Amino acid sequence: MANWPNKDPDDELDYVVDWSQWLGEDTIVSAAWSISPSGELALERQSETDDMATVWLSGGVAGEAYEVTCQITTAAGRLRSQTTKLKVKDL
């Protein structure tokens, strides 16, 4: 499981998953995001390019750690997920 830098509860920041090394010649068609535990950390918006998926997150509770999962679907019909740990901390 990858880790992103700590996030302050007041920040709304973008986080990226770079799939380029795994994709080869394939491309991303869609990306779906989920957060566990759900509730306090909010998914504000998302986007994807041919080889990267981006999510903008806000909120969260200081002292909590969240697992943010990105699942992509590729043009070749492959599915792949990556979960990243995000700690929320008063910075």
Image (spheres, rainbow, N blue to C red):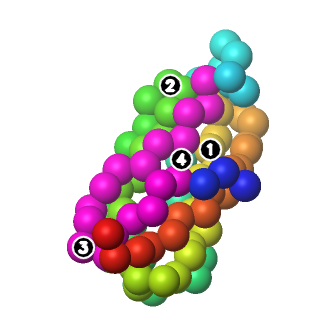
Q: What is the total number of numbered labels drawn onto the structure image?
A: 4
Please provide percent x and percent y for residue 73: 64, 41
State the mark number for residue 72. Answer: 1
Up/down of 78 relative to 67, above or below: above
Quadrant that contains the N terminus: bottom right
Type of amino acid under label 3: Asp
**Residue 19: x percent and y percent?**
62, 32
Q: Secondary structure at mark 2?
A: loop
Mark closest to the chain's N terminus, 2 or 1: 2
Q: Is residue 16 magenta?
A: yes
Q: Is residue 2 magenta?
A: no
Q: What is the three-letter code of the residue carrying label 2?
A: Asp
Label 4 packing within 10 angstroms: few (<14), some (14-19), many (20+):
many
Q: Sequence-wise, which precedes: disc 4 or disc 3?
A: 3
Q: Which residue is mark 3?
A: 10
Look at mark 4 in the image and give the residue it sits on: 31
| Mark 3, other Cα within 10 Å: few <14 / some 14–19 / many ≥20 | some
- Alpha carbon separation for disc pair 2 and 1: 11 Å
